Image (cartoon, rainbow, N blue to C red):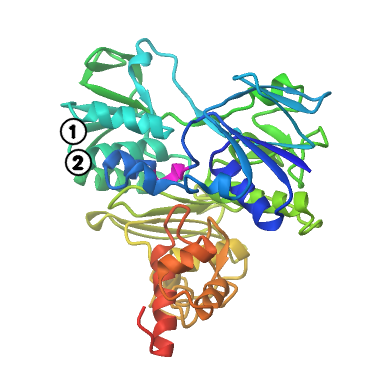
Amino acid sequence: MRLVVVGNGMAGARLVSEVRARDRDVKITVFGAEAWQPYNRVLLSNVVAGTSRPDQVRLLGPRWHAEHNVTAHLGVEVTAIDRDARTVVAADGTREPYDVLVLATGSEPVIPAIPGVERATAFRTLDDCDRIREAAASARSAVVIGGGLLGIEAARGLAGRGVPVTLLHVRDHLMERQLDAEAGLILRETLGSLGVAIRTGVTVTAVRERHVELAGEELVDADLVVVACGVRPVVGLARDAGLEVERGVVVDDELRTDDPSIFAIGECAQHAGRVYGLVAPAWEQASVLADLLTGADKGARYRGSRLVTRLKAKSVELAAMGETHLTDEEAEIVRFSHRHKGTYRKLVIRDGRLVGAILLGETSAVGTLTQLFDRGGPLPGDRTGLLFPGVGAAATADNPTRMPDSARVCQCNNVTKGQIRACWESGARDVEAVAAATRATTGCGGCRDAVEGIVGWLCEQEGVSA
């Protein structure tokens, strides 16, 4: 089988490695528009902040493709699909035939149509990070436009470099898709204490040479302007080829498009009317498709993902999942708020099951709540124990001694406690060895404390030093 993968980001690279792990004989060719080896886009804020080098966020080593007999065209964009000839055409003239084609073209930043926006820098790629870091070295002030995940991570990264930064957001509170107004307010205050000035409910009308102009002609100082106004799926290649495209490339439960030889995964794919913008669904899709393409599991199907959003900004702990905007009239709401400490916890319960949650500040309860959210099982009657692990009968899942082996510890890579235990029993005695064997902690990194806790507990049981 000749497999061609268009896209060498987090989805495409994961599919290639999953297929090769299952089958050594598939002829794999991958095209990546970026010249970089595949890297973890989730951790780019660390690169901006200077706490991680570009080589530390790589997903695959520099020799991985050659060592695994994968032909990689890096820095080469595919410009057309010839469906009749089953061939892709690249910008450098390469024509690559395929038996199976997988589109993993990802997404691109949304750039608002405002005067002077070409002076700003997007925040999406490692090249963007290089430009931001270079400009930040001499910048006396910076502005980030956009108060979603990417904007907050960019602003926090710049503040971490000591650059005075102002975050501008058109909505009334930050991360309005994931957070309610109170959580947004507390997040704002937390970021303010870390050096990020925040203006909400403002509209940017122009980017000037050393200023950003707001509606009403107010000027905000800015030697450096970063745009983080969201992303949109990259679907031009699929649309030009005549594939069914709505917001994303439409796929079924086998991740197949309306052309039986073409599939799509990751941020460019639309499944059951939904486009996912997080890493965990992309990796779930890659695993299902690898099973199908290699025959490892011909019954594998993708049924959709239950999302847990984690903010990856230094000194800010935030997790949000499910339906966070339901009201007291629509669901049972349990919440705890302590603005002075930067803490907010909210449970959204319907028919005795957890359908949403927000955890801001200390997030030790996230393991318990994620398991309950994933499984959709009935909740214990003591809601207090859900908000405060260690209190009441519900204090279970974050304690390794009580966590069942089926509990999913790493959401991004779908790694359970049982898999970590099996890995430990096979000789992996620290987090790095467990990560190498299972990929736990290598996605957003939010599960690292839980993995450390499990490994430490296992070592204690056997009297082994971790």
**In the image, residue 121 lies in the stretch drawn in magenta:** no
The residue at 26%/28% (across/down) is: 134
Q: Point out residue 273 in the picture as x, y percentages from the top left corner.
A: 69, 38
Instruction: Specify the segment rendered in magenta.
Output: 39-43
Q: Is residue 426 left or right of residue 264?
A: left
Mark yes or no: residue 425 visible: yes
For image coordinates 81% across by 56% down, the residue present is 298
In the displayed structure, would residue 194 be above or below residue 362?
Answer: above
In the image, 189: left or right of 285?
Answer: left
Q: Callout 2: helix, strand or loop?
A: loop
Give whichever of 428, 144 is nearer the camera: 428
Instruction: Report x, y in % for residue 391.
Output: 38, 78
| Amino acid type for the residue under numbered disc 2 | Gly
Residue beneath disc 1: 164
Residue 226, percent from left and from top = 33, 27
352 or 445, nearer to the observer: 445
Q: Residues within 10 Å of mark 2 (few under 14, many from 20)?
A: some
Q: Is residue 264 above or below residue 367?
A: above
Please tell me how crowded label 1 is: few (under 14), some (14-19), or many (20+) other residues with Cα within 10 Å.
many
The alpha-carbon separation of the residues under discs 1 and 2 comes to 7 Å
Taking 222 as reference, is 306 above or below it? below
Q: Earlier in the sequence, mark 1 or mark 2?
A: 1
The reply to whether the C-beta atoms of the residues labelled 1 and 2 are less than 8 Å apart is: yes
Q: Please tell me whether mark 1 sits on a helix, a strand or a loop.
A: loop
Q: Is residue 328 left or right of residue 5?
A: left
Q: Residue 240's spot in the image, x, y percent?
A: 71, 19
* Residue drawn 57% across the image and 75% down it: 418
Residue picked out by circle 2: 195
> Where, quadrant-wise, is the C terminus in this rendering?
bottom left
Q: Main secondary structure of the magenta part?
A: helix
Residues 430 and 406: in front is: 430
Residue 146, located in which quarter of the rendered image?
A: top left
